Image: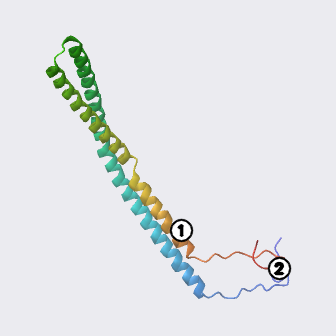
Amino acid sequence: MQEEPGAHGGSSEREPTTPAAGEASLLLAAERLFAAARQLVASMAALFAAEARLFKARLMLVFLAGIALVAFAVSLWACAVALIGWALRLATGSAGVALGLLVALHLVLIAASWLAIKRGIHAASLPETRAELAALGRGWRRTAAGFPVQTAARPGREGPAP
């Protein structure tokens, strides 16, 4: 069942609409938003690609440093056992001092490997990406804060909402 025009007391003809200044600025804002979103997606894709290359490069370093850490730990164990055996067998200080220096050298190598692994793991956790995402979020919040927020007033209420 179709209603006849003007059945509810209204006019069936619509007034012609003309683009107002508000509509033009809304279209301009939407165009800017779309361009910014497109630039954001392109920037994020480039950032993720760069971070993936960095992760790939650091992954091999972490792997090789892990192998070196195991090798140095095994050699430290062998040196420590040799040092203990040498110290128990002989009471001369010169051979023990030599093995002690060898153990100290291995401790330095193990410490350097450990620090290289920690550095590689930190770089692989993508701190630059997290910082960039935080900066983008702050920028979007600043941009969004510049747009006026209009809320519809509730019927029966006057003044600002509590």
Q: Which amino acid does label 2 sit on?
A: Glu
Q: Position of residue 24 (x, y in %)?
A: 55, 84
- Tell me the SS state at disc 1: helix
In the rendered structure, the answer to whether residue 108 lies left or right of residue 39 reads left
Specify few, some or many for label 1: CA neighbours under 10 Å numbering under 14, 14-19, or 20 or more: few
Q: Which mark is residue 160?
A: none
Q: Where is residue 41 in the image (x, y as percent from the top left)?
A: 44, 62
Judge whether 53 appears above or below 63 on screen.
Answer: below
Q: Are dots 2 and 1 in contact, CB under 8 Å?
A: no
Judge whether 79 appears above or below 61 on screen.
Answer: above
**Image quarter for residue 61?**
top left
In the rendered structure, the answer to whether residue 111 lies left or right of residue 136 reads left
- Pick the quarter of the image with the C terminus: bottom right
Q: Nearer the viewer, residue 150 or 133?
A: 133
In the rendered structure, the answer to whether residue 142 lies left or right of residue 70 reads right
Q: Which of marks 2 and 1 is nearer the N terminus?
A: 2
- Nearest-to-viewer mark from 2 and 1: 1
Q: Nearer the viewer, residue 23 or 53?
A: 53
Q: What residue type is labelled 1?
A: Arg
- Pick the quarter of the image with the N terminus: bottom right
Q: Which residue occupies 42% across, 67% down?
A: 39
- Tell me the SS state at disc 2: loop
Q: Which residue occupies 39% across, 55% down?
A: 128
Q: Which of 24 and 138 is in front in this view?
A: 138
Q: Mark 1 points at which residue?
A: 141
Q: Where is residue 2 in the image (x, y as percent from the top left)?
A: 81, 73
Q: Mark 2 points at which residue?
A: 4
